[in-house]
């Protein structure tokens, strides 16, 4: 492998060019046992719930609508929807599969909890011993507690959209810029992680704060110096430190300290890297927006119940409706300085994680974005019910200077909630 070959491979694989059409969402949940919610869930119960699911989707192995399930290092369950043609199909498919997931877990006395950090003071532990996660633990532990908290104590909603067209109003460059500008508003409007180990942290989105303190070579946004996001991302990938190196069974995957993928290409190391190594390296990078052929937005805290629908609708309409996109650009322009630290360490992102909708500038931008999305949903046939759900959220939270984290803090202060709320679909 050469540097130029690796550069070309990343540019071609991570950005699929074409008219935006597909929408997907990944929703992550903590699992609590109603009989003893302050203790980690026994692995046997997790596996019993997963094994009872009604599989047999389009490929015979997924949930009815095609969603796939993965178990995260701390026992979080992640449901990844199939790519759907349009927002409405994505919401319907995901709701259908979540209904099956909730029922299977409820039968085992388990509850799915949608919060950005686990709000309960219960031991955090690795429930998976895959060599990838052991290497991640080793890598992150050298720089403080943040990596382990991320792996075992955080959960998110990730919205996935097509990268964009070659040019025009849906050009890749324009969509890439918009999702990064939109980031602090999404952090603030959907902040839902004010507690960690049962105590307030002083941050509305503790999850986002954790990400902002981790290895910058894999958690910062790519440098904006390159006008082409494909160029920026290729350079980012090559200059990121290796988190792990895949090895034969029984051997640890830990990587040499400080070695970047570019270094590995140049020096060869224990063996020369392959294209498979490069593809795997890309899966260990965690910037706020990760290109995986499509754009994967990673900055949104997990939401209670069917709250994931609102950020999915907001992001999709603002990106896919050209009029809404123009309005969003105008609303977001005051937030980001041209220089200074990159997201998520820039001023707007840090204020979003700490103050959320309590920040007047972020609140104004959020209200303008919700208004643009409302108008776009009014132009989308069949979206009346979804439009009402988004409008209700805007009225309940941004219009009042609040976010879901404030509900958690109110309950914590009053002592009325000692366990997470029931996570049933409304």
Image (cartoon, rainbow, N blue to C red):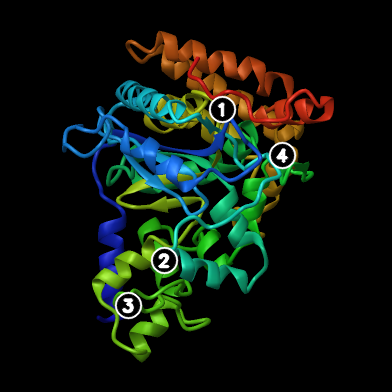
Q: CA distance from mark 1 to mark 3?
A: 39 Å
Q: Of the residues under marks 2 and 4, which one precedes in the sequence?
A: 2
Query: Which residue, as the protein is rendered here, is positioned at the far left?
Result: 59
Q: Secondary structure at mark 3?
A: loop
Above or below, 420 against 351 in this view is above
Residue positioned 29% across, 80% down in the render: 273
Q: Of the residues under marks 3 and 2, which one precedes in the sequence?
A: 2
- Badge 1 is on which residue? 304
Label count reads 4
- Please tell me whether mark 4 or mark 3 is closer to you in this view: 3
Residue 368 vs residue 22, the one in the foreground: 22
Q: Secondary structure at mark 4?
A: loop
Residue 114 vs residue 311, the one in the foreground: 114
Tell me if I can see residue 160 in this picture. Answer: no
- Tell me, yes or no, whether the two marked residues, 4 and 3, touch with CB atoms within 8 Å: no
Q: CA distance from mark 4 to mark 1?
A: 14 Å
- The image position of residue 204, as x and y in percent, is 71, 39
- Badge 3 is on which residue? 247
- Badge 2 is on which residue? 132
Residue positioned 72% across, 41% down in the render: 195
Dot 1 alpha-carbon crowd within 10 angstroms: few under 14, some 14 to 19, many 20 or more: many
């Amino acid at each position: 492998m050469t540097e130029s070959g690796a550069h070309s491979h990343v540019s071609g694989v991570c950005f699929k060019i074409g008219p935006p059409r597909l929408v997907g969402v990944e929703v992550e949940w903590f699992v609590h046992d109603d009989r003893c919610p302050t203790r980690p869930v026994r692995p046997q119960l997790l596996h019993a719930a997963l094994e009872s699911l009604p599989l047999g989707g389009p490929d015979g192995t997924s949930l009815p609508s095609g969603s796939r399930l993965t178990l995260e290092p701390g026992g979080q369950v992640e449901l990844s929807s199939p790519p759907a043609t349009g927002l409405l199909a994505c919401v319907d498919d995901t709701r259908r599969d979540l209904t099956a997931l909730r029922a299977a877990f409820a039968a085992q006395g388990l509850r799915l909890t949608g919060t950005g950090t686990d709000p309960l003071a219960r031991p955090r532990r690795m429930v998976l011993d895959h060599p990838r996660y052991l290497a991640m633990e080793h890598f992150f532990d050298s720089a403080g507690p943040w990596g382990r908290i991320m792996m075992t104590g955080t959960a998110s909603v990730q919205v996935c959209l097509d990268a964009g067209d070659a040019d025009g109003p849906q050009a890749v460059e324009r969509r890439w810029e918009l999702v990064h500008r939109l980031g602090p508003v999404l952090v603030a409007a959907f902040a839902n992680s004010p507690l960690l180990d049962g105590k307030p942290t002083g941050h509305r989105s503790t999850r986002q704060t954790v990400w902002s303190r981790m290895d910058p070579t894999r958690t910062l946004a790519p440098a904006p110096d390159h006008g082409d996001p494909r160029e920026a991302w290729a350079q980012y990938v090559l200059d990121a430190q290796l988190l792990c190196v895949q090895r034969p069974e029984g051997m640890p995957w830990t990587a040499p300290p400080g070695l970047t993928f570019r270094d590995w290409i140049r020096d060869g190391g224990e063996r020369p890297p392959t294209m498979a190594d490069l593809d795997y390296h890309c899966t260990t990078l965690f910037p706020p927006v990760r290109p995986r052929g499509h754009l994967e937005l990673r900055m949104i805290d997990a939401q209670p119940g069917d709250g994931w629908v609102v950020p999915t609708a907001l992001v999709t309409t603002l990106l896919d409706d050209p009029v809404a996109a123009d309005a969003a650009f105008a609303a977001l322009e005051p937030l980001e300085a041209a220089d200074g630290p990159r997201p998520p360490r820039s001023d707007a992102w840090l204020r979003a994680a700490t103050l959320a909708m309590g920040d007047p500038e972020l609140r104004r931008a959020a209200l303008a974005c919700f208004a643009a999305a409302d108008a776009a949903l009014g132009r989308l046939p069949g979206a009346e019910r979804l439009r009402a759900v988004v409008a209700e959220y805007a009225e309940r939270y941004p219009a009042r200077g609040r976010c879901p984290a404030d509900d958690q803090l109110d309950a914590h202060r009053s002592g009325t909630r000692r366990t997470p709320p029931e996570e049933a679909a409304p």
